[in-house]
Amino acid sequence: MIRALTQRQPLPAGSPGFVNDIWRIALTLLLALLGFIFFVVGILILRLLVDWLVIPGVKYRDFTEFYLLASAIRYGIDITLPLTTIGEHLGIDPTLVGFNHPAPYPPTMGLLFLPFAYIDYTLGGLIWLAIDFASLVAAIALLVQLIGSRLHPLLVIPIALALVAWDPVFWELKWGQVGTLLLLLHVGMLLLLQRGHPRGAGVLFGLALLIKPLTVPVAALLLLRRQWRVLGAAVGVVVGGYAAALLTVGPIALIKYFTQSLPTVGRFYSTFWPNISLATLGSRLFEGMWQPAVLPRPEDAVMVSDPLIASPLAAQAILLLLPLLVISAGLWAVHRLPLDSAVAILLCISIAVSPISWIHYEVLALPLIAQTLAWLQAHGWPRRLTTAVACILLPMLFWLMIWLYLGLSFTRPRLEGELPHYPAVATLPVLMPGLLLLLLAALGTWMAYHSLPLVLDVETRSPR
C-alpha cells in the first residue's frame, strides 16, 4: 500500500504539487461528467430494450438460438440440425430464426436454458434480459470487493446502468447473450482465488467453460501454476456437465456437434466481417470477408472483401498459429503474477485472439479495467500512465460501426454485378477492439509487476 502523508501544508500556486492537484480535480470532473452522460443514455437504452421485447412476436436475437437449442432438447429434436429447421419443427417462421446453420453453442448451453423451453418466448426474453442485467450488477459488486475499493454499494446499480451505454454491454443485452453471466462467474472465481478458496474458484470456472469454452487459456495457466485443486474442481464440473448432456441428447448428437456443427459454424464466422478476433487477420488478407451491406446502398443484401493474395492455406495457418503464439507469450508474461491479476490479463488475451470473437465479449475485460484503474488511483494517477490508459480505454468506448465505417469511408468498392467488393484493407479497422485488448493486457502486465509499496514525494505527491 502507498503510505500517503496525512498532514500537509497548503501548496503554493504554480508548485508541482498544486499542478498535480489541478490534474486530479480535472480528471475527476471529466470522469464524473462522462459517467453521468453514460448513466442517462444507459437508462434510455434499457427502457427501449424492454419496450421492444414486450411487443408480441419472435425477434431474432442470440437468445433465439438458446431458446431453439433448449426446445430441441425438450422435444427430442436433433440439436445438430440447422436452426431454421429446428424453428420449422417448432412452428417458427424460418426468416425469424437467423442464419441457416447449426447452433454454435454446446449442448450444455441448451441444458442451462432448458427452463425457458417451457415458457412463452416473449416472457423468456424479458426474464433473460433481467437476469443478464442482474448478472452485470452482481459482477460489479464483486469487482468492487476484488480491487478493495470503498465504493458505496448504492453506486453499483448506477455504474451498471452507465455501462449499458457501452457498446459491448449494449449488444450483450440487445442480443440476449451470456457475457454478463460469464463475467459474474469469472469475477467470482478471481475473488475466491484472492481469498484462498481454490475449489470454489474451480467450480465457477468449470461452469463458465460449460457455457462457453472461451477462456480455456486460463486452464493452461492453472496447469502451469500447479493449481491442482482449482483444476480438479473445474474438470469435475465440466465432466459432470457433459455427462448430463450425453444422457440428454445421446452420444451421436454429441459427436456430431464436435465433428460437424462446431467446425461448420467456426468456418462460417471466421470470414464474417464484424468478427473482432486478431486471428481473422489471415482471412482478411488472404481469403476475403463478408457481411450484410451497410454501404454504399441499403438494398444490397451483402458485401464482400477481396483478398490481397488468394491463399486459403495462409489464412488457415494464421488462424491457428496466431492465437497459439499470442497465448503462449501471454502465459510466459503472467505466470509469476498473482493469480487474480494473471487471470484478468488472460481473459483479455483470450477475447483478442479467440478464432470467433464479438464486440460483446469485451465485457470480460472489465476485471482488468477495474484493476488498472485501481492501480492508477493507488499510485496517485501518474500523468503519463493515466494518459496511456486513457488512450486505450477511450477508443474502447467507440461503437464497432465506427471502425467499420472508417474502413469503408477510405476505400472504394468495385461492383461485380450488384455485389460490392471492397479491398482487404477496408476490413482491418474492425480489428482495433482486439488490438486494444492486447494493449490493455500488456499495460496491465507491466502494472502488475510494478505494484510494490511506494512512498509519496512530499512536494508533488507523486511516486518516487
Image: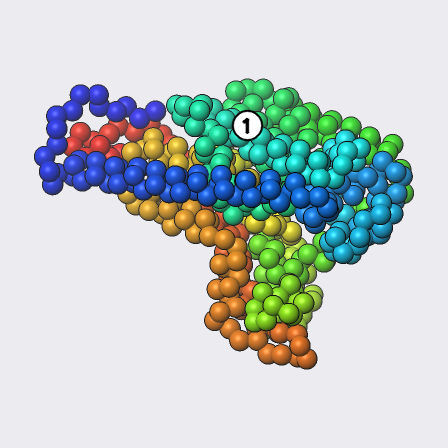
Question: What is the residue that sits farthest to the left in this orientation?
Answer: 12
Res. 360 visible in picture = no
Q: Where is residue 53 in the image (x, y as percent from the top left)?
A: 65, 42
- Write the residue at 87% across / 47% down: 89
Would you call the spot at circle 1 few (<14 residues within 10 Å), some (14-19), or many (20 or more)?
Answer: many
Residue toward you, 350 or 359: 359
Q: Say which quadrant the N terminus sits in.
A: top left
Question: What is the residue that sits farthest to the front in this orientation?
Answer: 55
Q: Mark 1 falls on what kind of element? A: helix
Q: Say which quadrant the C terminus sits in.
A: top left
**What residue did someone put label 1 on?**
138
Q: Where is residue 94 in the image (x, y as percent from the top left)?
A: 79, 54
Residue toward you, 140 or 435: 140
Q: Where is residue 7 in the image (x, y as percent from the top left)?
A: 17, 21
Would you identify the image quadrant in which residue 374 lies?
A: top left
Q: Is residue 109 left or right of residue 429?
A: right
Q: Where is residue 46 in the image (x, y as percent from the top left)?
A: 54, 40
Residue 149, placed above or below residue 262: above
- Write the residue at 80% across / 33% down: 118
Residue toward you, 105 or 44: 44
**Amino acid type, mark 1:** Ala
